Amino acid sequence: MGWLVLLGTAMAVVGIGLLGYCIYSAFAAKRAELEDAVMRERLQKIVAINMGALLLSVLGLMCVVLGVVLG
């Protein structure tokens, strides 16, 4: 089950990287001092990416735990 642990680790790392991207994008949008409607639209896109990143990280950690338990 070593492959499951490696797959889960890769998924978790990509998810954490996407979370970092979301944080950077949100701060960049805040610094840009955009209008309210444009800011809201940009943050909605960032929130969607954020939820996907969280899901990917959770699934990766589940794969790691499952690989350790079964291995």
Image: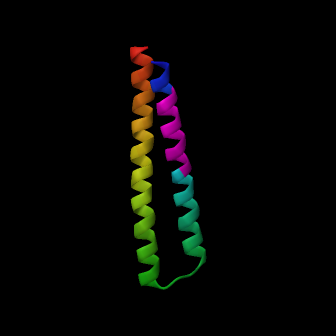
Quadrant (top left, top right, bottom left, bottom right) of the N terminus? top left
Q: Residue furthest front?
A: 3
Residue 68 x %, y %: 45, 19
Task: Identify the residue at image location x=40%, y=69%.
Answer: 44
Which is the main secondary structure of the residues drawn in magenta?
Answer: helix
Q: Residue at x 45, y 50 (%)?
A: 53
Image coordinates of residue 47 in percent, x first then y, are 41, 62
Q: Return the residue nearer the eye: 43 or 7.
A: 7
Disc count in the image?
0
**Magenta segment boundaries in residue numbering:** 6-17
- 15 vs 25: above or below: above
- Colour theme: rainbow
State whether residue 45 is above or below residue 3: below
Asked which quadrant contains residue 13, the reply is: top right
Q: Position of residue 15 (x, y in %)?
A: 49, 46
In depth, the one of 39 and 13 nearer the eye is 13
Q: Is residue 49 magenta?
A: no
